[in-house]
Structure formats: C-alpha cells, structure tokens
Amino acid sequence: MEQYSNYRLIHRQTLLENAKAICDFVGAPVMAVLKCDGYGVGIANAASIWREAGANMFAVSMPEEALALREAGVEEDILLLAPVANADILAELLEKNIILTISDLENACFYRENRGEHTVRAHIAVDTGMGRFGLGWKDRENLARVYQLEGFSFEGIFSHFAQSFEKGDKFTKMQLTRFLSATEYLAEQGIPVGMRHIANSCAALRFPETRLDAVRIGSGLVGALGAPAPLKLKRDVTFCARVVAIKHLEKGDTPGYASLYKAKKPVKAAVVAIGSQCGFGMTPYPDTCRFRDLLSEMKLLLQRYLHPPVVEYQGKKLKLIGRIGTQYTLFDATGTQLQGGEEVTARVSRLFPTQRRVMR
C-alpha cells in the first residue's frame, strides 16, 4: 500500500518563516486559525509552528478541532468561531475550557441553560455583511441584552470580512465602520467588550486599520492568500507521489479517458499515483454568476491549456499524457532513468486535510 501512496511534504522551517514574518509585519497579537486540519499542515503541527512564532491564542471552526488540540496537549486559549447547538458537545467543550462564539440571543440562552456549573467564556459574533453568524450590527438592543445574561465571561467581540481578498476596499471599509459602530455603542453603555477582532489573513496584511486588538491568521501560514499582499510569503504545496508502473507506448497509442492523446513516436510513460483526488491539476470554479468571475475562469482555462500541470523528477519536468485521472495519471518520462517505485514531485492547487503528511 505504501508504494502507491502520495503525501504532502511539509517544510517546517518555511512555515515558521511565514508565521514569524506575519507576526512581525502586523504588529498586533495573532490569533492563529487552525481550521481544516491546520490548512493541511496538521492541526498540532500548525499550533506548534505558530506558538514558536509568537502566537498565544488559537481559533478553530469545528468543535472536533478544538478537542483535537486539547488532546494534543495544547493549553493555550482556543476560540471556536461557530456557535454550538448540541448540549452534549457544549458540555464537552466547556469541560475542556474552550471559548465559545455567541451568534444570537437564542444561542446565548441555550448556553446559559445547558452550562451546568461552568462559566461560559465567550466572544460575541457581529454580522456586518458576511451574513453567516452573528447578531446584526444595528441590533443594538439584543447586543446589549446578551451582555446582561448571567453565567458568562465576555472576553471578546468579532466579525468577519466578506471581500478582503478582492481588488477594491469599499465593502471591507464599510464592514469595519459597522463593526466599530457596534463596539463603540456598547462602550458608551459602559459594557466592556474585551478583545475586538475582525481582520482575517488578507485584511490583516492589506489594511492596517483593520488590525484592532488582534488579527486572525489562517491561510497565511501556507502562503495561500486570495489577493496580492505587501508581505511576500512562501507557498508550501509540494506533493510527493509514487510511480506505480512504467508503460512503453508505441506510435499511434491513445492512452487515457477520451483518447485525447495520440503518441507521435515511442514514449516511455510513467503511471503516477496522483490525480484530482489530491488536488493535482484542479482549478477553482467560480461559485457566483458575476461576469468578472466568468472572465477569470476563462483566463485560468487558457493558462491551463498553454501550461498543463507537470510532475518533476530530478529537476526535469515530465509532461502530462492525456487527461488527469482521479488517482492515476500518465506522464512522459522519455529520456529519464525513472523506474517504478520511485517518487516524483508535484504542485497542487488545493489543501486536503486527510492527505498523509511528512514534516521535515
């Protein structure tokens, strides 16, 4: 089984350099976001790297991620960025001293009724335009009512940007203004809100005014930002894959689905255990109907046509043969000494949390 598996090669020093560079650049406390298994790095690995870089608080998006960090021995504060609606899960999170998100008044009442003997440590989510979690930024009455509930330790308040990765900054600035309006109102009422945080990776690096009391950095660790930023980060998306077999093609052979490729001469083909299952050659499709998204997709498809994805062996790029398979794909190894059982390396466009990892 090991012979056919591929894995993500992680260079710890590269990620540590990214983390340290971010901490130095933003000049604000960093709350390291470790969702999606630490963005493919491994949640415990990512926590260790961020801790060494200077981050002393973590955030996750799923209850099991918070519990996994505690299981791994992480003692720092952990914020769960989504509300909880299950009493058994709530009890376990409270037992592990996880900081919870309050999304609305009903959610807060649920926590209060099911907290047992625990004091609920909480951050309040404010919806400033993302439209996912949080009390509305104009819903000042219910915002104030939440803070009046007993049984809570209110330690922070936050929101989330919807467009911080896009070219313009109009909507991002509007969301920031809305968020500050809500927090300033609470302050005027004599309500201490604790830590204010709204900036994600792109916002923290691109818009200094969004940094407030802390910033949340997730994808920045692996250099996977959605927009150009003033800080140069290194990408860590190298995959190693095994060559399962060597296939000798004759002139006229048409391997692969749809027979798109036709050999013009004898070819030494390497069958590599890599494909769309691990993100190789995948391009993101637009999930909206904006015309500019369609134009971006056309540009990506043109780039893919002109520069098909490759794998590398001893510094040589091996060209793709035919279509990319789900698990196995053919590459032209003519002129190399590549044999079955050896490894090739590749670049992938997505992070898959379940992928086997090797830390070096």
Image (cartoon, rainbow, N blue to C red):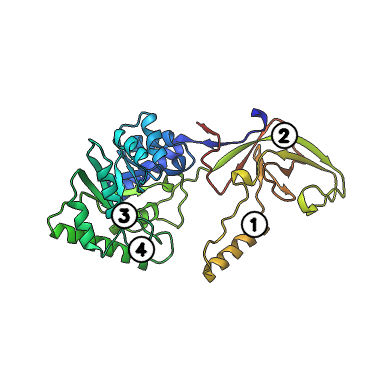
Residue at x 64% of width, y 36% of height: 241
Q: What element carries label 4?
A: loop
**Earlier sequence position, callout 4 versus callout 2:** 4
Q: Quadrant of the N terminus?
A: top right
> Residue 316 location in percent, x, y?
67, 42
State the CA–CA distance, disc 1 to disc 3. Answer: 35 Å
Please state which amino acid type lies under the numbered disc 2: Val
The residues tagged by marks 4 and 2 sit, at their Cα atoms, a distance apart of: 49 Å
- On the question of residue 215 being in view, the answer is yes
- Farthest-out residue, right: 251
Among numbered discs 1 and 2, the one appearing first in the sequence:
2
Could you tell me residue 152's position as x and y percent? 21, 44
Q: What residue type is labelled 3?
A: Ile
Between 233 and 143, the residue placed more toward the observer is 143
Instruction: Give, as a three-letter code, the residue at label 1.
Output: Arg
Q: Residue furthest bottom?
A: 291
Mark 2 — residue?
Answer: 244
Q: In which quarter of the image is residue 68?
A: top left
Q: Which one is earlier in the sequence, the residue at label 1 or at label 3?
A: 3
Question: Does residue 180 lie above or below 320 as drawn?
Answer: below
Query: Toward the viewer: 42 or 104?
Result: 104
Query: In the image, which is nearer the foreground, mark 4 or mark 3?
Result: 4
Residue at the spot of label 1? 304
